[in-house]
Image: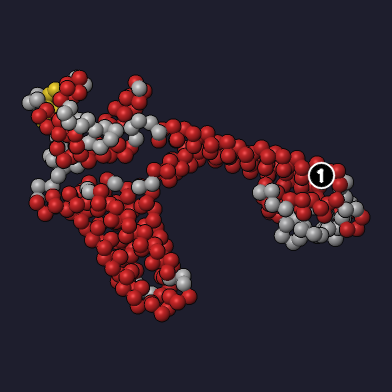
Amino acid sequence: PGIHTHRGTHTLHSHSPLLQNPINKYQGFFFDVVSSKAFEITIVTLICLNVIILMWTSEEKYEDYKDIHEIINKVFVAIFTGECIMKILALRHYFFTDGWNIFDLLVVILSLAIHIVLKSPSLLRIVRLVRVSRMLRLIRQAQGIRTLLFTLLMSLPALFNIGLLLFLIMYIYAILGMAFFACANLYGDIDNIFNFQTFGGSMLCLFQITTSAGWDKLLNPFLGTGSDFCSPNLNRQGTDNTTCVRSSVAITYFVSYVIISFLIVINMYTAVILEKLNVATEESTEPLCEDDFDMFYEIWGKFDSEATQFIEYSALSDFADALEKPLRVSKPNKIQLIAMELPLFSGDRIYY
């Protein structure tokens, strides 16, 4: 409990500054609207509907309803434009402190530019990309997806190091493959692209083996003997152009690479991701998560409209009751609040 309390206090005080409610009554109205959960749910629903309409464009009968579809798209653009305008009016300069808001603004600007200024059929793919990109906003609402993304971000340094190790192994085996099998005849899956005559071809062969996709078919041509195995036409100096390698060497080469790359190194990716996923899952199951702190600040802002970071002690009971679980202390709660021994500041105020 002490560790959880420490983490909660650290997150609480490292949070971005509280938003000051607008003085203008119209801006205040927009502030209340964009801060409500109903507004966020409505926007998310509209995003999902927009994506469904986008799926409609891939149907064969799309041309029959092209005009209707275009009108619907313009309606969606107008709605999302209105959303950005409302947020800018309500949040003022605080709007640009949130990366998601900047992302929404860029999507809206690009959509307007394509629909109004650049009316070109060749930009249809860009229009679709812009519309689909709105789906990324759903990440904010999906705790499970956020956990997976957090896992990926934590794993990136280790995955990069494993990737370098895998590249080093592939580089060494590519050089060995050119030394052993450069004179092999083009036979079976060994062709003009997948071969060991060049470094690039060797890397392609090893990449296919790393995925464990048909590596046995690459090995099969090297198990033969005689003219089917040796290629004297390769332009090499001396007698190297007729050098043939025993099948035992080919088997050792391929099997050792499969064991090192696929069974060991590739599985290290899985091990790292699973380890980081366990860490991310443990953090997401703590008593207090980021969503709880966001809820706390949202409710606090209603009691501290001027963003002073203080509320009157007389309003503490109502504030504690207004919170949602697990932070809520429902009324009657005066005894519980007194037991917390919260420090009082000048003017009988409570610091957040």
Residue at 79% x, 47% y is 179
- Residue 256 lies, in percent from the top left, at 75, 40
Task: Specify the quadrant of the image occupied by residue 348.
Answer: top left
Quadrant where the N terminus sits is top left
Is 138 placed above or below 334 here? below
Residue ranking furthest to the bottom:
64
Lateral position of residue 47 relative to residue 278, left or right: left
Lateral position of residue 205 relative to residue 66, left or right: right
Residue at 85% x, 60% y is 233
- Residue 169 lies, in percent from the top left, at 68, 41
- State the residue in front, 273 or 58: 58
> Which amino acid lies under the numbered mark 1 shown in the image of this protein?
Ile
- Residue 325 lies, in percent from the top left, at 28, 35
Lateral position of residue 128 relative to residue 253, left or right: left
Residue at 38% x, 74% y is 120
Can I make out residue 343 in this image?
Answer: no
Lateral position of residue 315 relative to residue 40, left or right: left
- Residue 296 lies, in percent from the top left, at 24, 36
**Element assignment for label 1:** helix
Task: Specify the quadrant of the image occupied by residue 234.
Answer: bottom right
Q: Tag 1: Cα neighbours inside 10 Å, few (<14), some, or many (≥20)?
A: some
**Residue under numbered circle 1:** 251
